[in-house]
Amino acid sequence: MMGAATHQISLERLSEEHCWLIFSQLAFMERTTEECAELENIGRQIARKSSGLPLVAKTLGSLMRFRKTISQWEDILCSELWESKDVKVREIFAPFLLSYYDLTPLQKRCFLYCSVFPKDYNIGRDDLIEMWMSQGYLSQTINSKKEGRDCFESLAMRSFFQDFKEDEFYGSIKCNMHDIVHDFAQFFMGSEYVLIEVDGIEENKKEVDESTRHLTLVVGSEDRFLTLRHNAKNLRTIYIYSNTDKLHVDRMLLFSHLTRLRTLNLYRCYIESLPEDIGLLKHLRYLDLSGNTNLKELPGTLFNLYNLQTLRLGNCSSLPRLPEKIAKLVNLKNLYIYGCRFEGLPKGIAKLTGLLTLDMWVVPKERKTYLDVGDLKMLKYLQFQSFLCIKRCASMGNLDESEKINLSSWQHLLDLTLRFRETGELYEIGEILDADTEILESLQPHPNLKALDISDYLGATVSPTWMMSLTNLTSLELNFCTKCEILPPLGKLPSLVSLVICCLDSLKKVGPEFLGITERDEEDHGTARRDQDTPSEPSIISFPRLKKLTFDWIEEWKVWEGYRMTTTTPTKIMPCLHSLKITKCHNLETLPDFLQMTPLQNLSVKKSKILQRNVQKGTGKEWYKISHVLNIQINKKYVQKNGVWIQKDESDDGETSSSE
């Protein structure tokens, strides 16, 4: 890509010993020392089959993890696949075939289906499970998602997936497949799967015939007009993966003859409307339209798809509403609408009593027109979902309405967003402060909650009585709480890892109250220390697990104070802090003294002119508090990386500085 290479690096194959280390780490997991010794000799012989390839060593190790006896290990070592006349099977696919044959029929079907994703695609676990459900691989019960997760875990343990990215807050998992594993899945699918890269006339070079069940179209950067011919009538899956904003779907030919389709993925295909004949897809169970920001209307015929189980409309920001006809989708289990700008939800949703997932609920202003709070009791299975956004909380009007939701009983809810109003929405401030405070108080979540986002809230304080009961809370964001003058004692939250505070227009000072340390705490700890029988001393720890702290766009904020202890009680403040970002805090002058005692590794100060001057190396009066930080970025002009300070000639505020 960069031109002629003057020096090439050839990657050597791994040594036998390195392959053995990879293999044994997986194969001997959870085995006793005696079992490992008994299996080591034959294990080394199997590990040699890796031929120096780490992926093969990993795959074989994962396979042998589930084989208990020597005879089972000998079966793998002596398998005829190692002597196959097919070179591709013998040299590339043999270890994957052995793992594949070890799967249950359900696991085999689910694994092979993963070939529909393009290479290097980030596969969402729950999205994949819903696609498995749409193909009829999983049972059609309330436990189908659990069944799917168990299957996913089994495939993951056999190294069919890699590069796992788990959301640290509510358990969302993404992964991908190694190219060779992906090739293996496609190889095994044979003519049932076709991938077509649409670029110029490339789409005509591969045929979709009556044996094809699953089709992936990867659309390039040119203007495309997609059609599918009548020989595609047996398709069960169409997955369109687009890299262009000029994709057009043929309204006449796309759906009229695809009546056996189960799964249709049109994610971010830039479509503006759907053809009426989508209503002919009577067997369709999964439809992904998310990310189509130009989609303005859903055809009425779509709601004739009574078999539909999953409908994804996330971030379809131009879609004005959901029609009442949605009540006709009697088998709908998962409805994703987060990122849509609806005024409310249709009352027809209350009739979808089997709904398992509704990721956003909008409190309506017009109660007679839209779904009301009391209607949610009809959706009894929603309490089993992990994420929920409630929009326009301020429109609840009275406490009775907010208490009807009874979030404190939603023990499976891990991630909650409370958006009180649309940003910039007009309001009468005199009527709001107390109302917002009372509504927030009544929206108490279950203590299992891991992530909380409160935004566009106009109470004088963001400190409901239940805040400190969230002992499992990992992430907290306070956004556009423009009337909040004092921060809650968030330092008392024992599990908090990430904290973002953004656009608190009335916040002028962050003081000791933020740390959650009081004189009473010192007295209590002093008493406990005197009463202890053991010599160890209890200490006060503020923000015991906090790693990431962000302050953004707090223009009136001037002072950030720490806390001066009045006793000899051992105290720790932010002992795990790794990253601190301060952006658009134009009046902030000081940093707290305790920062110099933290293990802070990364500091970013941007568009905060006073603080930028005060933290300059050597000359800034606040420099000594951050001099231990390895990586510092000040408006991209002054940078310290791994302790080496690089100073540019011009700072963002126009001041000239000498280079060091």
Image (cartoon, rainbow, N blue to C red):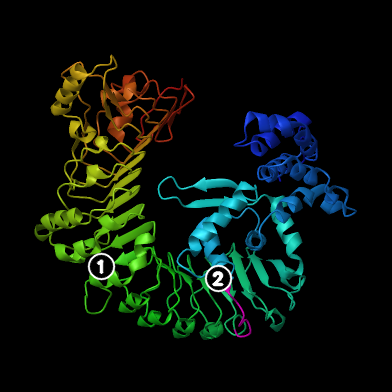
- Let me know if residue 245 appears in the view: no
Q: Which residues are magenta?
A: 256-265
Query: Could you tell whether 36 is left or right of 370 in the image?
Result: right
Residue lying at the far left of the rendered structure: 430
Residue drawn at 32 percent across, 66 percent down: 361
Residue drawn at 55 percent across, 46 percent down: 164
- Which of discs 1 and 2 lies nearer the camera? The answer is 2
Residue drawn at 38 percent across, 60 percent down: 384
Q: From the viewer's perspective, is residue 271 above or below residue 411?
A: below
- Identity of the amino acid at label 2? Ser
Give coordinates of residue 572: x percent, y percent: 29, 24
**Disc 2 designates what residue?**
134
Q: From the viewer's perspective, is residue 112 above or below residue 24?
A: below
The disc placed on residue 334 is none
Query: Which is more toward the observer, 547 or 224?
Result: 547
Query: Could you tell whether 658 is left or right of 99 in the image?
Result: left
User: Is 180 colored magenta in this rendering?
Assistant: no
Residue drawn at 78 percent across, 35 percent down: 42
Give coordinates of residue 437: x percent, y percent: 15, 53
